[in-house]
Image (tube, rainbow, N blue to C red):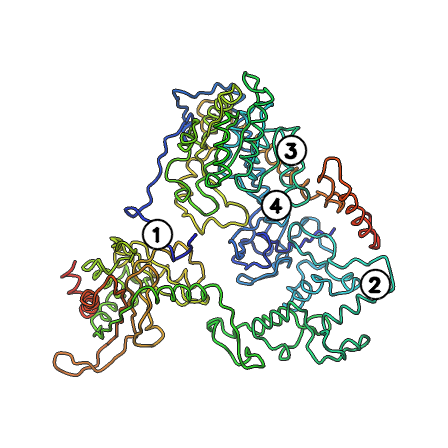
Amino acid sequence: MSRIKEFPLPDLGEGLTEGEILKWLVNVGDTIELNQPIVEVETAKAAVEIPAKWAGQVSAIFHAEGETVEVGTPIIAIDTAPGAGPVDEPAGRPAPSAESLAAVTVAPAEGMVEPGMTGGGRTPVLVGYGPRTTAAKRRARRTDGSESKATGGSESKATGGSESKATGGAANGTVTVDRPLAKPPVRKLAKDLGVDLFALTGTGPNGSITREDVQEAVRPAAPTAAPVAATAASFGPDREQRIPVKGVRKLTAENMVASAFTAPHVTEFLTVDVTRSMRALDRLREMPDWRDVRVSPLLLVAKAVMAAIKRYPMINSTWAGEAIVVKEYVNLGIAAATERGLIVPNIKDAGRLTLRELADAMTALVTTAKEGRTSPADMSGGTFTITNVGVFGVDTGTPILPPGESAILAFGAVREMPWVHKGKVKPRQVTTLGLSFDHRIIDGELGSKFLRDVGAFLTDPEAALLAWG
Amino acid sequence: MAKGNAAPARTRGGAKPTPAPEFVQLLTPEGERVDHPTYSVDFTDAEYRDLYRDLVIVRRLDAEATALQRQGELGLWASLLGQEAAQVGSGRALQPQDMVFPTYREHGVLYCRGIDPIMPLGLFRGVDQGAWDPNEFKFNMYTIVIGAQTLHATGYAMGVAKDGKVGGPDGEAVIAYFGDGATSQGDVNEAFVWSSVFNAPIVFFCQNNQYAISEPLERQTRVPLFQRAAGFGFPGVRVDGNDVLAVYAVTRDALDNARQGQGPTLIEAYTYRMGAHTTSDDPTRYRIASEVEAWQAKDPIKRVRAFLEKQKLADDAFFDQVDEEARAQCIHLRERVLSMPNPAPLTLFDHVYADGSPLLDAEREQFATYLASFEGSEH
């Protein structure tokens, strides 16, 4: 047994196939104890710490933080006898390239490789419910002849495709393919993702296309690219792309349909001069105890909404069939565009927060959302929502109410525009507010007054704060 | 159930009320012995120390199992962290003739029954189905199905009564373990009805650890759980589940009532699951850190240690020795888990029928022939 032991990522939660390295808690060269936490890993189910399986010295770390690692792939090597002099094998082999790792984990997993091929190299360990101490390979049958021939035949059938006679016939030597080599699950994946197998170069055995090759093909070039945006490469031969409706997209769709067809929406618009608000923000940024705080126009809009809700509490209510439930607390939802899609986390009891607390809460909320760590609790129980469409450079919109809420405010881009100010046309900072509300609860008068007050606050925040407390 | 943002939060006056439950307590979180009008314990100094040793060893073995799961050696583990006193207190109150029906988290009770702690690890490693003999240790197999064991226990207890084994100080009692979530199961309510109507010699021991996976207690019940017993017609009592002395006293009392022929009791051990539901769960997604911290102050082991120190019943040498003993047991456990053999394929057929069956024998033959068709096969 080698004294350098490699620890493969185990299946941490009943049937998971991968995990993301969140944080390494040890460095190469560290001496570690048995069960000392070495790494934080996040899976689809949980973020957990993994304790060291052996005491010793860390001789290599194979994956950086942020990398997603397949179950069974070594993530760390530990020298279990660091005091015993030099190792006869290289301590800490060079980190394997993505291709070699993929080849190691993929090839033996499905028994594609003939038994002899796995003999020489590193023994792949596929850890699920306990490690496998032997290479995953198909055992040879006792009966010779027909059985072993059948194996060869079935392989070319599985890889080459049974429809093609030409492929099946070319059993020996180089295989001429009129269809790219790929296993059925990979073909299915490619079809689901709209990837054209002809456009790919396979990195698997015999040049076959692997799961990784397909996934690589759909990985967005830049991390900021919207996941839904179709690219030329992702269209199939029929020049159409099918994107499965699931996750956040599905939830958004269900919520929007439910809301749009139950609550009769009315939308009103108001264009206001927010020059004073923008100046107030500048002054805020210069104050010593606000130096490290993220201050955005959205903060003042949120404050304006809080002030106006206090004056018109009916805005903050729910249609509950037999009754209208008016809430004293405001759970302020902020619509956030994330890589996973639209999510609307909310700030609990935002009406009780000072401006500074509100600013901190909004920063935390957005950071959490962008990191994809927003909890279900953060997203439930919202009572009023602001959607900041201005960040996309548009003026306003007719937002749809989140289910259970009675009003939603769209905040458009703040632009420098010609505006009549004190009798003269001057360049001023102007924005457009769009308020959608549920006409079952809120009539035009109430909605208009509320919107007018939000506008008045943003036109002259100091006066509004003095006048309304 | 409605999920996520579709369900409006149910709030009453904003903040969630902090429960300040009335319960039987004999040892405060600070380690002070307090008296109770009904319940008391009378332990020797050595017995107090033994309870502390049990608590520490049970916790450490559990932590080792969690680590083994994270290292890929177990498929799953349901940690008992935080519930040691509920399990050791009730486990030590059992008489040898009493029968236990556990859930899959009763590692502490299993330990008190004298079963090798490796046994549940074999189950969670997937190399056996739970390999202890339930009759030898009077401790049934772990039941994974939520609440199902309460009906098994009720039937067993009714059988005990029919066998004439109740009605004296040497009578046999049955104890069924379950959690707060299981109280919403039909099985548990049916078990209550049957036990009550047939006056079965059974103790229903509910470890209320506040969460059914992610569902908080307020989604299970509008009344304290122990009060439910009144509706079924037998007594219910709530005990500080983190107080090993009170749990012991209340359980012993309830078991004695059962063995004397006084029928069932529901015990609600009010405790907290400090860890995840299982290793597949992430509790930070549904509960807040301050709540966990508040329960840390009520730790079941800390208070026993404080008591031993204040009463000068134990010194540092003792505590060190317990730690060392726990460490040695963990190492021993780990070594044995890593060397657990994979089961031979044909053992699949071993425990299906006590006396075999022709169909099963034929299938075993077929499978053996299939296995023998491989080169180098041992079977």
Local packing at callout 2 (Cα closer than 10 Å; few below 14, some 14-19, many 20+) is few
Disc 2 is placed on an element classified as: helix
**Image position, residue A121 (x, y; %):** 75, 62
Identity of the residue drawn at 76% across and 62% down: A118
Which chain letter goes with mark 3?
B
Disc 1 is placed on an element classified as: loop
* In front: label 3 or label 2: 2
Q: CA distance from mark 1 to mark 2?
A: 63 Å
**Image position, residue B256 (x, y; %):** 51, 21
Along the line of sight, which residue is nearer the eye, B379 or B56?
Answer: B379
- What mark, if any, has residue A147 been given in the picture? 2
Which chain letter goes with mark 1?
B
Residue contact between numbered discs 3 and 2, judged by CB atoms under 8 Å: no
Q: Amino acid at mark 1?
A: Ala
Disc 3 is placed on an element classified as: loop
Q: CA distance from mark 1 to mark 4?
A: 38 Å
Q: Is residue A149 above or below residue B29?
A: below
* Mark 1, residue position: B9
B177 left or right, relative to B122: left
- What mark, if any, has residue B68 been given in the picture? 4
* Mark 3, residue position: B116
Instruction: Give the mark nearest the N terminus, 1 or 4.
Output: 1
Local packing at callout 4 (Cα closer than 10 Å; few below 14, some 14-19, many 20+) is many
Disc 4 is placed on an element classified as: helix
